[in-house]
Image: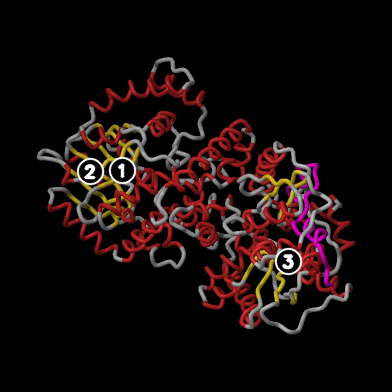
Amino acid sequence: MSLERRTAEALREGARVERLWRVFEETKRSRDEGIRRLSVDELSLVRESKVSALRRLEELVEEVRTAVERAGGEVIFARGAEDARMTVVRVLKDAGVRKVIKSKSITSEEIHLNEALLSAGIEVVETDLGERVVQLSGGRPSHILGPALHLSREEVAAILTKSLGEGVDPDPGSIVGAVRRHLRGEMMRAAAGITGANAIDSETGTVVVVTNEGNEQFVVGFPGLVVCVAGVEKLVKGLEAAVRVARVQSASATGRMPSYVTLYGPRWWGDGKRFVLILLDNGRTEALSDPWLWQVNLCVRCGACFNVCNPYRTVSGLVFGKNYSGPIGVVWDAITSGFDAANEYAWLCFSCGLCELECPVGIRIPLLISRVKSFSKRDLKVSLLAGGFELYARLGGRLAPLLNRAHKSRAFRAVLEALAGIDKDAPLPDFRGGTLRGALESLNISDDRDVGAGTVVYFPDTYTSFIDWGVGVEAVITLRSLGYKVVLYSGPGTHMPAIQYGGLGLASAVSERITEALLPYVERGARVVVTEPTASYCLREVFPAVLGTPESKTIARSTFHLSELLVKDGLSTEFGRSELAGKLAYYHVSCHGQGSDLMDATRSLLERVGLRVVTRALGCCGMAGTWGMRSGPVGRGLSSEIGRMVTERIRAERPDLVVTESSVCSLQLREFLDVPVLHTVNVLRPSLNRRRT
């Protein structure tokens, strides 16, 4: 079934969408609390230990082999999925095993181990509750930690009633009781156990496994033969480092410390036990040579990126996934199953960047997904969106009346949908006509020539330059009124659609041109100012990552959002009470504005002018530039559903107005809300206490 069809079917299940959003909102709150309880060094120490292990991976493989074999165990290195499957089958059949119990092994899903065992005549029983329910349903997991999250209690009860032959009520107590009774007998008849690993200490061969149910302790403690199937990236040096990985994984997964941390291996047993460690490569070491994809090996499988991914929590991992799921799943599937497999669902990602902010080890997940997309066979429509947005915007600046009328024509919209894939019902902006530079010249505002420490280069990006320059005019007037010398950047825009759709070649070329244009000003002491969060995201995050040059990093350090600059320079007192004072303003922080000082700075300024401000961590509104304008379920269909979910939560706050810095977010919010949606500068500029222009 195609991605479009699967997405369309998921969008029709409104009750499931509501339930998934509630689950992930609560999980994120709990996770945030858990991360705050960790010491300041733990996250960096985990990343350092993982990076160090990857740099000397061959050495650690030999070290763990020596340690395990010295203690009487076995280590087998499996190059690929087929190799791993056949190795497990051979080990079990040679031992005469007819029944095996499993716990905590998403890696076994990667290699389709259960199917191989069943084909070999070996019965497999999953012992984790969610995994067992999914197994009995005949489906596949939708989440790396909560395999059955996509199922309601009623659906779980129905599956158990049918499979176990007893009536099971749809409440947690009845469900857990039924599964416990069912598993007890199954587990007692098993001759072998299989687990995965959260981490493996290369020095001793100790496997660290974390669960909240404790079934893994029976799986490794009762049978005489235990097999651990784990990716080679799980190796770290030292037991302390391995336990620390498990601790951070737990905190970042649910916010709670695990109920059970099991340490096992050949050194932990007496005579009569057999331990086999199967280290799986399956693309992992090859990924280490890729300038982007190597980072996936840092993943601790916490699932935190799932919590903030609005496409994922709208359609679930059954759509947003294959062997793996969620944002990081795109990358795992790319290196373990190939780029074609990953690109079957990678297009559900619209590069909001929130998953990177959530990752406890700092994986650049959005850029890794763009790298995966770069290997896809893009059709003409996607290529036009990736490279044609700025051209269309420039054309609109010249032909505003004509294109504004055309946007209201059903015939023109049908042609636009056929050629570029822009949904005929998607909200399109009205072109103001002309350009920002032209508008400033008509107001006799020209670039300041004496560039120095008091100078800012205003970077308006494409939307403000050519579509609606009103925000740009207000920003320049505000800056000049506060005493800054202002130079208007006039080069190419950041081409964010190219990054969204995997056009990293174009993104690299554009980032070089922009860096070259801005560098002479920055080297003379000027700072770069933006009013569009996506522009700051590109200048501060994407371009340095794409180019990796000292020059791009210099530009990144010198780039500020307008609100950040004003607060940093101590200019908050220049603003007085607004005509909007006393009104309740919902502040929508766009995706690319998060992870910086923008939110706190803007909120303090809005409160300074007398607004009552409320905000929530709702994630992307679903517009995401041209992504939310694309036709079909994977596009405007999903965008609208996300927009509905976000604006329902905004509406619940009963605001008098909404304030945001993002022009494209404004399009989406105005579509669903019936209150004014203003840019921050539209609120601040009229509140200046004095003007110097």
Residue 218 in the image: state x and y as whole percent.
25, 32
- Cα separation between marks 1 and 3: 50 Å
Point out the residue furthest to the top here: 167
| 682 part of magenta stretch | yes
Q: Which residue is mark 1?
A: 209
Q: Is residue 676 above or below residue 455?
A: above
Span of residues in magenta: 667-693
Work out whether mark 1 precedes mark 2 in sequence or the reverse, and give the earlier one: 1
The residue lying at 66 percent from left, 63 percent from top is: 567
Q: Which mark is residue 418?
A: none
Whether residue 341 is visible: no
Q: Secondary structure at mark 1?
A: strand
Q: Which residue is mark 2?
A: 264
2 and 3 marks in contact (CB < 8 Å): no
Q: Secondary structure at mark 2?
A: strand
Q: Nearer the viewer, residue 315 or 645?
A: 645
Q: Which mark is residue 462?
A: 3
Q: Nearer the viewer, residue 289 or 249?
A: 249
Q: Is residue 329 above or below residue 19?
A: below
Q: Amino acid at mark 1?
A: Val
Residue 472 in the image: state x and y as whole percent.
78, 66
Q: Amino acid at mark 3?
A: Thr
